[in-house]
Amino acid sequence: MTEILQFFWDNKDLIFIIILSVYLGIEVISHVPAVLHTPLMSGSNAIHGVVIIGAIIVMGHAESTLALILGFVAVILGTLNVVGGFVVTDRMLEMFKKKKK
């Protein structure tokens, strides 16, 4: 228990920055108007594509089995996130199309 408390005491500035960034992220995202959700989803899909490329590069330089497994999991989860984002974006764009009679 003392090691955990010592870790928090030694890294209190970093922990404060993480807590502040989480709070700021929640506040920013909760105030986004509904009109902007589709463009923001497309932008986040592009960012996650970059994350997938980075995870593949890290997997290529992995020296341990644990790093390889974590890289593989990162690629799988990132791919699921990108595909899910495109599905949600497609459904949102379908709402704006005119219906055929």
Image: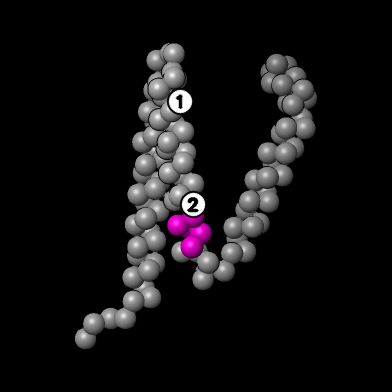
Residue type at tag 2: Ser
Which span is picked out in magenta?
Answer: 39-44
Q: Is residue 34 above or below residue 42?
A: below
Quarter that holds the N terminus: top right
Where disc 1 sits, the SS reads helix
Please name whichever residue, 80 or 39, is drawn nearer the observer in this view of the structure.
39
Crowding near pointer 2: few (<14 within 10 Å), some, many (20+)? some
Task: Name the image quarter holding residue 86.
Answer: bottom left
Circle 1: residue type: Val
Question: What residue does disc 2 label?
Answer: 44
Q: Is 43 a magenta residue? A: yes
Residue 58 marker: 1
Say what secondary structure mark 2 lies in: helix
Identify the residue at image location x=51%, y=59%.
40
Furthest residue in direction top, as rendered: 64
Q: Is residue 82 above or below residue 95?
A: above
Label 2 – label 1 distance at C-alpha: 21 Å
